[in-house]
Amino acid sequence: MKRGLIFCLSLILLLAVSSSEVFGQKKKYKDKRYEPATRPTVKDYEGKYVGVEASYWIEVFVSPEGKLSINSYEGERRATLSDIRLEGAIISAVKVYEDGGSENFSGVFANRILNGQSAFGIIVDNVQVKVSGVTLHGLFYRLREESASDAPLPIETDARVARAEIEARYNELAEAVRNKDFAAFQSLRTEDFRALAHDGEMQDNAQMAARAKKLLDRIQPPINVRNTIETFILLDNEAIAIVHQNFSRMQKVAGVLHLIETSVRQREMWVKTGEGWKLKFVDGVRDQQTFVDGVEVEG
């Protein structure tokens, strides 16, 4: 259980860093962070907390004796929380589903500060919610005020739209590579784009642009690129995508033309600008594979 609680606190740090440091967003564009928060009495936690859609929510009740009762609604599934423990802002329990299944529940009550506006809710870490093909992890469930509409919150329900827009961007990137169009390729990155290589070396936009131009100059048809989003998280006007990239092309090695096929998974962070979504930061490179003429090679 401690592992889950540590993850929750790490998630708060990730979300705060994502908005102010990793994405490098200008302050006038957005100021966003999460702060663990407690309330004066147990009764003050009572209410409906809305997450991804109207069908994904958490309800918190408090008995006259001050005991917490919590139900979690996840689409067509419903779970009752047992062994609930509240220690400061950290809450942990066991989710027991109606079909008899169970799993740990851990979360942190927190305030989301967005451009000076505060919203209270729960960050829940050990979830995997799929909505129309979108997989979300580490959800923020916002406490719905009594006067608020029951309509879904835009921060989460817009995830499907954002994912579709970013998928279109990946198609544009693939087309730019197939056409060996460096200008089109570079236009889909922010001016302060950065990438953290698997060896831990950070490279800035100029370095990455030089690498891209060199590669585009060397590759020859047939050129095929496929980017598959495996996990997607929307953070307002910023998004994180875990992407599986497959790239095949003809390329000279030691002066001899070969079929080169590469595959990699990496975390890619996007920011929405006045010109649409642009790639901001890449890290988490893993599962790299390289094949030369169908034979796997190291490195």
Image (cartoon, grey):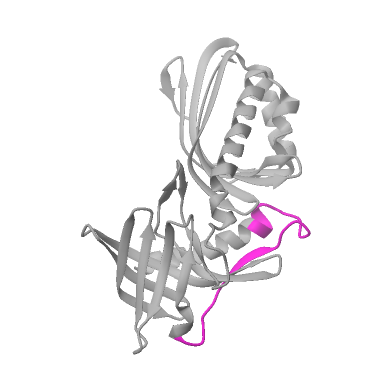
Q: Is residue 169 above or below residue 271?
A: above
Answer yes or no: is residue 199 visible.
no
The span shown in magenta is 19-41
Q: Is residue 33 magenta?
A: yes
Answer yes or no: is residue 42 visible.
yes
Q: For the point 51% across and 87% down, which residue is it?
A: 40
Is 58 or 31 nearer to us in this picture?
58
Q: Is residue 68 above or below residue 101?
A: below
Q: Is residue 20 magenta?
A: yes
Q: For the point 63% across and 43% down, which residue is it?
A: 195
- Split into 4 quadrants, where in the image is the N terminus? bottom left
Percent coordinates x, y for residue 47 in the rendering: 46, 74
Query: Is 37 positioned to the left or the right of 77 in the image?
Result: right
The secondary structure that dominates the magenta segment is: loop
Percent coordinates x, y for residue 63 in the rendering: 35, 84
Q: For the point 62% across and 19% down, which residue is it?
A: 178
Is 121 or 230 nearer to us in this picture?
121
